[in-house]
Amino acid sequence: MPSPRDATIIPYLKAIWILQHEERVRVGVTALTEKLAKAPATVSQTVRSLADARLIRHKPYGPIELTLKGEQLALAVVRHNRIARAFLYQVLDYPWPEVAREAEGLLPVLHDDLANRLHAVAGSPQTDPYGNPIPGTGESTVRQGRPLSEQRSGVELEILRVSDTDPALLDRFDALGLTPGRRVRVEQTDHATGVISLICNNTAHTIGVQAAYRIFTARPDGKERQYPGQASASTQTASVAARPSASLSVRPSTRTSIASE
């Protein structure tokens, strides 16, 4: 039976929580297989182990739901993971595209006290470097963004969050400056070729529609609908923390509350 700190199950708990609370999709073996990029047989076996450990509820062909114990562990995993990312980026100056991969290796050794200390040293940010909200950072205003591929042309937008699951795509976004806090404007969408022309940092770029779907944006004037708090983390995007520069907004800094595991 797996332990709460088993490195094998940590990615599963994190993925289930994100799918359920932030991406708002029905969590099943297929969704987990796609999210984790693992073989269906491997996912099915681990799901059975999680059910045996009473961390999830799952019946064949039915949805996967976290139990109370599983919910608490998953929430701690998500919080610790995003704090580790913020620490690596803010304090240790890890390259932005590499932060997601490096932070995974820290999860098995992180606990609440250490995570809280790392969070404080990093400046108590409300989001990780990819714009994902850090649970337990207190009340804040969370904005619901839309994929860049769905935005109208000619409208100035702010990048709120980017998908952090594809290392190659993170490298591409970093090279083009398509990171949280940047301003971007869609110039034209060519549906025939699946290519979007855009302006970012006063420079013209082209990216594929599928890549643009992984960049979540909103109007910088905040006229989109506002959603209170991240207590339930029921949003796709958040107010963004980004490394300060002439064209980036400065990371917010707020005092964190301690999340129990």
Image (tube, rainbow, N blue to C red):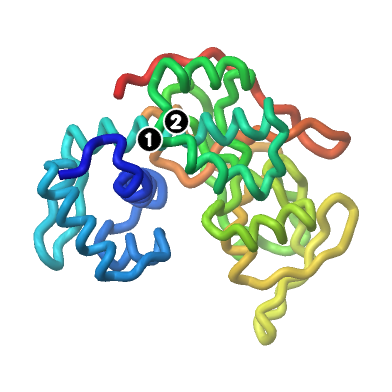
The crowd level at tag 1 (other Cα within 10 Å; few <14, some 14-19, many 20+) is: many
Say which quarter of the image contains residue 77.
top left
Instruction: Read off the residue under disc 1.
Output: 77
Tell me if residue 38 comes above or below residue 93 in the rendering.
below
Residue 53: x and y in percent read: 13, 43
* SS assignment at label 1: helix
* SS assignment at label 2: helix
| Residue in the foreground of this view, choosing between 21 and 155 | 21
| Residue in the foreground of this view, choosing between 142 and 174 | 174
Q: Residue furthest bottom?
A: 192
Residue 18: x and y in percent read: 38, 46
Say which quarter of the image contains residue 41.
bottom left
Instruction: Read off the residue under disc 2.
Output: 80
Tell me if residue 49 comes above or below residue 234 in the rendering.
below
Apparent side of residue 216 relative to residue 72 in the rendered image (left or right): right
Apparent side of residue 172 relative to residue 1 in the rendered image (left or right): right
Name the residue: 17% across, 34% down. Answer: 68
User: Which image quarter holds the N terminus?
Assistant: top left
The answer to whether one can see residue 39 in this image is yes
Tell me if residue 27 comes above or below residue 83 in the rendering.
below
Marking on residue 30: none
Residue 30: x and y in percent read: 30, 68
- What amino acid is labelled 2 in the image? His
Apparent side of residue 31 relative to residue 205 in the rendered image (left or right): left
Q: Distance between the residues labelled 2 and 1?
A: 5 Å
| Residue in the foreground of this view, choosing between 11 and 226 | 11
User: Which image quarter holds the C terminus?
Assistant: top left
| Residue in the foreground of this view, choosing between 157 and 18 | 18
Check if mark 2's residue and mark 1's residue have beta carbons within 8 Å. yes
The answer to whether one can see residue 226 in this image is no
The crowd level at tag 2 (other Cα within 10 Å; few <14, some 14-19, many 20+) is: many
